[in-house]
Structure formats: structure tokens, C-alpha cells
């Protein structure tokens, strides 16, 4: 029994409690917001909406999975990178056979219908990409700026990006690009390559407009510039922005938002527009608190990477941080009508089983980095204090 308590004590001590508590706090905040956003969908006699129940279940399962992953030596996880990559590619290819799309985009194939939940493979593939790309960068350490290395890394990044684009999920493809750029930057890629890549992207924009974007995606961009010409397309964002403005500084009160509590007044309020629900009911203060929690999560993950004692996990920590930060910026930009709606959720806050479950896979990975980095640091310190009788000779 003493050994069990000792193991539990070590488990708690070596867990990054700050990061875990911040993530749980964000999930609780998000779940409560989803509860309010979907209150009007609850039938007579019901207490909670299906979206709320699925989110809570996914968060609870995610926290458990994160803690399990945290006790697995990350070196074992990294050794599994080739298998992880193959599984991720397999999941994306599977979408072409059985994938389904949202109602407004039946041509897209972004989800797999599991019967009790819709699973979005791109969410877990993001984590797999961070692992495999990080391992690849470590293998090329010292030669990352060689043209052959750039070609290899470019192909590595373009495989998941291309598959995601092919399924019709441009939003996730953008997040993959943000992750890859952040990891390449931290790994030490010369700035000249970023400049050349940026110029290439700008030059390719007309081709992307003509051949990559479908009519609905084009209309979403045009609606930002000409809202009066696309009233149906811009409707969701206009209503969301009205909700944000209606909340003022302190908000209209929990479960009291005039638009939030009106059925279908804000389409997808529990998903893409959850930030507007926070703004209307909790005001500017609520929005700032939500963004601060997310900022602290990102900074905590970066801090784990900065204290890497081995040297092969820093890029992956920054990749996870870039994934979360990128999605936050895109989602808030959508709600403020700075960016078109591209289906990017607010991490830890938006409803969705797969997104809330998979984000904790990333958290578990960071917790593993933190735990085993700590252990190696302690071993290193203790070895320095060992007396060596042969050192005098």
C-alpha cells in the first residue's frame, strides 16, 4: 500500500498541474458556454442538450487519455512516428470512401459518421503531423537548410495538407500550414526560405482562387468585401457580431443573451460562433478571460519546450502551441468579421466530440514531455553529486 501511495505521489509531483488545470478550466468555461448556446434545443423536461452532453463526455475521456499518455515515455511515442504517420494517412484516405460533409457542403468529406458521434480525422491527424514532422526535423538537424532537406520536409508537409484540401476542409489545411511554418522556424530554417515561400504563395493565389476554392468558399471571401451583395452568406457573421456588440462590458447575463437564447438567431453558435455567445452573455470581460486562459495555455506549452533538456521536443511543443494559437486567431477573426467562415473551432470552447477529445491527445503529449524531462534533469543532478574516487588520477 505504501508503494501505491508513493507512486501516486510521484505521479502528481511530475505532472504539469498548471497546464492541466488551465486546460480543464478552459473546458469547463467552454462547456458552460455550449450549455447556454444550446439551451433552446432542450425539449420539455430535459436538462441538458445533446451537444453539451457529448462535449462533457469527450472532455472527461480526453482528460483521462491525456493522463494515460503522460505516463508513456515520449521517446517510445516518437519511435512510433512511422506507424503514426501511416495511420493518419489511412484515416484521411478513408474519408474519400465513407466521409460525409456538413449540410451546407454535402460535396465535402470531412467527417466519419460513427453512429453516436461524428468524428473528424483531421483533428487527430494534426497531432500525428506534429509528431512525425518533429521527428523528421530532428533527423535533419544540422542540415535543415540543405535543398534536399527542404524538399523532403516540403513533401512531408504537403501530404497531409493536400489530403485535407482534397476532402474540402480548407480551414484545417490552413492550420496545418501554420503548424509547419512554426516548427520550421523554431528548427532554424533560414529566413530566405520563408521569404521565397511567401512570395510563391502570393504568386499562386490566383491559381488557388480558380482551382482550389469552390463557389461557396469564394462567396465567403467576397461577402466580407461586399456584404450587401451576399446577405445569406454573411448572415451568420453579422448576427454573431451583433451579439458581441450587444454584450457590452459585462454582458447580458448567463442564459440571458437575447440572440443566444433565440432559436437559430446565430447559426452554429455552439461551434464556430461560441466566442460571440461569451461576448453577448459575459461581455468584454468574459471574452478577455477566455482569451487569457488560452494565452496562458499556449505560453505554458512553449515554456515546456524552452526547458527541453534533450533537444528533440522543442519543435513539437511549439507546433502544439502554434496549432492552438492559430485556431484561436482564425476563430476570433471569423467572429469579428475580419476573416471568412472556414469552419475552425475555438480550442477547448467550441462544441464537438472529436475536437475536444483530440486536443487532449496533444495535451497528453506535452505532459509526457514535461514529466520525462523532469525525471532526466533530476537524474543528471544526482549524478553530479556522486563521488568518483578515480577522478584524482
Image: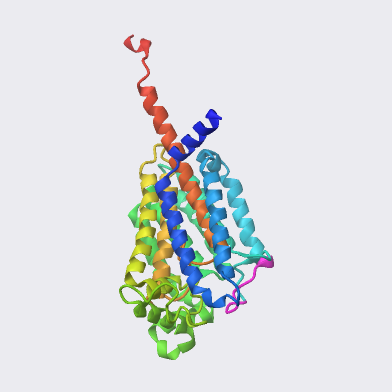
Seen in the picture, residue 154 relative to 342 is either above or below; the reply is above
Viewer-side residue, 200 vs 264? 264
**Extreme-bottom residue of the structure:** 229
Q: Residue at x 49, y 87 (%)?
A: 232
For the N terminus, give its image quadrant. top right
Q: Quadrant of residue 275?
A: bottom left
Q: Residue 343, can we see it?
A: no
Indicate yes or no whether the magenta region holds residue 77. Answer: no
Relative image position of residue 268 (x, y in whole percent): 51, 75
Viewer-side residue, 60 vs 121? 60
Q: Residue at x 56, y 68 (%)?
A: 51
**Extreme-front residue of the structure:** 45
Relative image position of residue 222 (x, y in whole percent): 43, 83
Left or right: residue 184 compared with residue 157: left
Left or right: residue 277 compared with residue 78: left
Q: Quadrant of residue 57?
A: bottom right
Viewer-side residue, 232 vs 153? 232
For the C terminus, give its image quadrant. top left
Indicate yes or no whether the magenta region holds residue 97. Answer: yes
Q: Residue at x 36, y 10 (%)?
A: 389
Q: Residue 51, can we see it?
A: yes
Main secondary structure of the magenta stretch:
loop
Counting every numbered tag in the picture gives: 0
**Extreme-left residue of the structure:** 249
Relative image position of residue 32 (x, y in whole percent): 47, 66
Q: Quadrant of residue 55?
A: bottom right
Q: Which residues are magenta?
A: 96-106
Relative image position of residue 342 (x, y in whole percent): 48, 72
Amino acid at each position: 500500500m505504501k508503494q501505491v501511495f508513493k507512486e501516486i505521489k510521484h505521479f502528481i509531483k511530475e505532472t504539469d498541474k498548471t497546464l492541466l488545470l488551465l486546460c480543464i478550466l478552459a473546458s469547463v468555461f467552454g462547456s458552460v458556454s455550449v450549455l447556454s448556446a444550446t439551451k433552446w434545443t432542450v425539449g420539455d423536461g430535459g436538462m441538458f442538450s445533446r451537444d453539451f452532453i457529448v462535449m462533457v463526455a469527450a472532455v472527461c475521456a480526453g482528460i483521462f487519455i491525456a493522463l494515460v499518455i503522460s505516463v508513456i515515455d515520449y521517446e517510445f511515442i516518437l519511435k512510433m512516428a512511422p506507424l503514426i504517420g501511416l495511420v493518419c494517412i489511412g484515416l484521411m484516405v478513408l474519408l474519400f470512401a465513407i466521409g460525409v460533409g456538413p449540410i451546407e457542403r454535402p460535396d465535402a468529406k470531412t467527417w466519419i459518421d460513427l453512429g453516436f458521434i461524428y468524428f473528424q480525422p483531421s483533428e487527430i491527424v494534426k497531432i500525428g503531423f506534429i509528431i512525425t514532422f518533429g521527428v523528421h526535423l530532428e533527423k535533419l538537424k544540422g542540415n535543415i537548410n540543405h535543398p534536399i532537406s527542404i524538399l523532403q520536409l516540403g513533401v512531408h508537409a504537403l501530404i497531409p495538407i493536400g489530403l485535407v484540401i482534397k476532402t474540402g476542409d480548407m480551414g484545417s489545411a490552413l492550420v496545418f500550414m501554420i503548424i509547419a511554418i512554426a516548427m520550421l522556424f523554431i528548427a532554424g530554417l533560414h529566413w530566405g526560405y520563408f521569404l521565397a515561400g511567401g512570395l510563391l504563395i502570393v504568386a499562386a493565389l490566383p491559381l488557388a482562387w480558380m482551382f482550389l476554392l469552390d463557389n461557396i468558399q469564394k462567396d465567403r471571401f467576397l461577402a466580407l468585401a461586399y456584404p450587401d451583395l451576399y446577405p445569406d452568406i454573411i448572415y451568420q457573421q453579422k448576427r454573431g457580431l451583433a451579439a458581441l456588440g450587444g454584450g457590452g462590458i459585462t454582458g447580458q447575463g448567463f442564459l440571458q443573451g437575447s440572440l443566444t437564447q433565440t432559436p437559430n438567431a446565430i447559426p452554429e453558435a455552439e461551434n464556430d460562433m461560441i466566442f460571440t455567445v461569451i461576448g453577448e452573455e459575459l461581455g468584454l470581460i468574459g471574452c478577455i478571460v477566455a482569451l487569457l486562459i488560452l494565452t496562458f495555455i499556449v505560453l505554458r506549452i512553449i515554456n515546456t519546450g524552452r526547458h527541453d533538456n534533450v533537444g528533440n521536443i522543442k519543435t513539437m511543443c511549439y507546433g502544439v502551441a502554434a496549432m492552438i494559437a492559430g485556431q484561436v486567431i482564425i476563430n476570433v477573426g471569423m467572429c469579428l468579421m475580419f476573416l471568412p467562415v472556414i469552419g475552425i473551432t475555438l480550442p477547448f470552447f467550441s462544441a464537438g466530440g472529436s475536437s475536444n477529445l483530440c486536443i487532449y491527445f496533444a495535451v497528453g503529449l506535452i505532459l509526457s514531455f514535461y514529466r520525462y524531462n523532469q525525471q532526466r534533469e533530476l537524474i543528471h543532478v544526482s549524478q553530479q553529486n556522486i563521488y568518483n574516487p578515480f577522478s584524482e588520477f
